[in-house]
Image (cartoon, grey):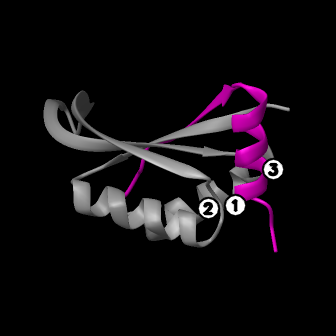
Amino acid sequence: MGFIIVYITHQDREKAETVAKHLLNRRLVACANIFPITSIYPWEGEVKRADEFVTLVKTVPERWEELKAEVENIHPYDMPCIMRLDASANDAYERWIQKETRKG
């Protein structure tokens, strides 16, 4: 079966929750976990440090392209981090993800 976890960074908790709820309402994801993180990265010639929030959302591979396009459309960053990780879990959890992300 299998599923994917999508890692998305956000400037603050409010934006992370807004994106997560939007994806849940569209049934593009079954679940979203939100964590505070510290990011360090090169940007415009400088090393930057930012306190951000990351969401880990769970969905099926068939919804990846639609999910990615939706996040790119609503995310406030010019270049949001939207990273796909293939995953597997216990059968019952994977069936639940399949059920919650079913179209229609």
**What residue would you read off at disc 1?**
66
Q: Residues within 10 Å of mark 1 (few under 14, many from 20)?
A: few
**What residue would you read off at disc 2?**
69
Q: Residues within 10 Å of mark 2 (few under 14, many from 20)?
A: few
User: Is 29 displayed left or right of 8 in the figure?
Assistant: right
Q: Amino acid at mark 2?
A: Ala
Q: Residue furthest front?
A: 92
In the rendered image, the vertical position of residue 63 relative to residue 56, given as above or below = below
**What residue would you read off at disc 3?**
62
Q: Residue visible at 72% across and 58% down?
A: 101
Q: Nearer the viewer, residue 78 or 1?
A: 1
Q: CA distance from mark 2 to mark 3?
A: 13 Å
Pinpoint residue 94: horizontal percent, then vertical percent.
Answer: 74, 37
In the rendered image, the vertical position of residue 39 relative to residue 24, given as above or below = above
- Secondary structure, mark 3, is helix
Q: Nearer the viewer, residue 44 or 33?
A: 33
In the rendered image, the vertical position of residue 104 relative to residue 28, given as above or below = below
Pinpoint residue 42: horizontal percent, then vertical percent.
Answer: 25, 29
Q: Amino acid at mark 3?
A: Glu
